[in-house]
Image (cartoon, helix red, strand yellow):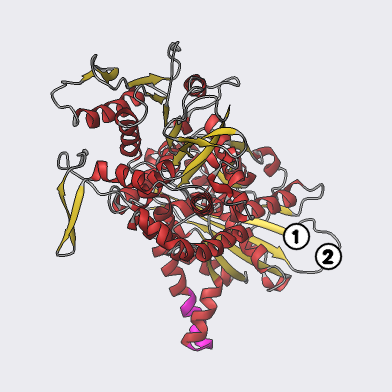
Amino acid sequence: MKRKKQQAIDLLQAQVPDQQRQLESLDRRLLDYYMDLCEHSSIDEDDPYDWHNLSELLAALKQLRLMRTYPVDVDKVHQVIRLREGIWQQESGIWKHKGGGLSQPGRNGNTYYMWMPFQVFVLTCMYGVKAWVDTEVPNGTRDLLPTERWGVGGTIEDLRRLCTDFTLFAPRKTDKTGLSAYNNFLYFMLEDDDSEIYCCANSQTQAKLLFNRTSDLIRQMDPNGNRIRFTSSEVNWKQGQIRRAQLWALSAGGKAKDGLFGQLCCADEFGSASYVRGRSDMGALVNVVLSSMGPRREPMMFTSTSAGTISSGPFVDKLENINRELLNELNPQPEGNDGRLISASDRWMILPLCPDEWQTDEEVLFTSKAVRRKVNPALGVIAQNSFYEQSVADSRLDPLKKKETIAKLFNVYSSGKVTQWLNADRIRQLQQPRRITDCTLANGWRVFCGLDFSRGDDIFAITYLAVDYKRSASMAGHFFADMTAWVLEETMKKSPNRPLYEKWVEAGWLHVCPGEVFDSTYAINELAMTREHGVDIVAFGYDPAKSRQPINQLKAWLQTLFMQNGSAADVSNIIKQMVVPVSQTSMTQNPVILHLEDMILDADPWLTFSQNPMWPWQFGNCALEVCRGDLRRVCKGGTANGKIDNVAALVNATYLFDMTENKI
């Protein structure tokens, strides 16, 4: 997919200059949006200025192609942009509202807002491009309507809005509701005289939110209710008015309405609609409304949604098909044809604001500010970075909050699918009376050390993975894992695991650290003692999300060891190679998990464990979270009290071995 993204970037950079004048004639912000796509898109995972995903680039390429292929109604675009934002002028470099427009709810009451570039893109996609559609009515059989012409193929052609299906796939705090409500407003005020607009949602509450927001916009056109009738569930024109448009709120699972004649179906938060026994109430509601649109010249399906915490649903299927179809934009497409409709697939468009598929791992989402910018172009305008920071911090403590944050703020489907892993009995069979101090360099062993640092209520874990580098005809027993673990004194007093902890402390398998904060000096002393026994630790792997103070102490200790034999620069380089941050993403962990399974499940297992009873206990608490692309990462499989810290450290240690294999 990275290769395809680079193709998309190259195509955009080649095409945008040729269509620069056309983009600017529609709105300067549309050109700004395309220039931003060209300048801030990359396949480098560490690029802080990679602000756009592959599907967004492909959607932008599609819109450029459509504007080259079909007539563009510049006046219509100007109308729909101006009608809400009104007239603005710059004064001393600051844009100020001068009149007109529709006020929107804000932090300090109703106010006026200018459209952001990505919103201008949405409005242009929906209202800017038209196409000559064959009515299949023979020329000369009736008078032409103002929008029609005699077709060269012998049948009447009608100039209609091209887009009949638009999807805004964006996270919370991108003004999806505001844009949806304005779209409803346009249909009520400007489209067919008898427009029927339906606010469809999974729940009555959600449907009413959108309905009320739309009603507030319409009321600004008739504040005294002289021409328009407002009720709690319907807005329509009063008798005697030329227009007969209606606005309704419909919720999934409710009684189906008969006699609908929809022109606009606004499906709000469609992405959260799941399949239950093969059907979806929300999907059924949407289909009822869509099936009523047959006689409409210019119908519209407008989907405004973020991702959900479901694994399957009607929108999930639709999004998958859209992403697959968008890849066709990388291949040459037919253009021209006097503006006649070429393909029905040209009638749908999308703006997908989400990470690229290689950025959907939890730690990448939570730590990359480039990903935040990629999913939320309104960052700093509607949502603040501090809001994301707090949401991430809360999510690290609450698994349910984590799923919601990933789905709604980062716009990634997070089904939370979890599968079982290695059970405790399997690990017990591999335990043997050996400790890490038996695995010395003199006997041919090299050791990789995984670290997992406690945040307070967890176990502070050190895991040793010893590798026998002596030549052997068999891999049996080639690897050996031992552990050391500490628990805070205050934590143990309150923990539901206290009976287990006390038993292990008494037997010497678990250690207690006084106070409420772990003193990493204990870990350094443990490592120093292990080294003094002749154990050669060649590398240390740690989770960078929770490591600063202990890692600084570890590096300081290593520096004291090596300074006697080298320069400061040499020592710094050695420590950099030895102390390695290990990403906790599924892309990193999946091959390591496969390696551990090979070692443990082999008929003649390669990996054995010390007799520490915490090994089978922690493995029994483990599960595998299945992420996108069927990649897996280790997670807790039971309650929050089931610790897995030493297993997580074992994954870090095994990653180090895999990374340095044959390089020691």
Label total for image: 2
**In this rendering, would 58 be left or right of 371?**
right
Say which element carries label 2.
loop
Q: Quadrant of the C terminus?
A: bottom right
**In this rendering, would 477 be left or right of 151?**
right
| Residue 565 magenta | yes
Q: Position of residue 632 (x, y in %)?
A: 61, 46
| Residue 228 magenta | no
Q: Position of residue 259 (x, y in %)?
A: 44, 12
Q: Mark number for residue 268?
A: none
Using the image, determine if residue 279 lies above or below residue 433: above
Earlier in the chain: of badge 1 and badge 2, it is 2
Would you say the residues marked 1 and 2 are in contact, meaning their CB atoms lie under 8 Å apart? yes
Using the image, determine if residue 148 lies above or below residue 205: below
| Residue placed under numbered mark 2 in the picture | 472
Say which element carries label 1.
loop
On the question of residue 414 being in view, the answer is no
| Residue placed under numbered mark 1 in the picture | 478
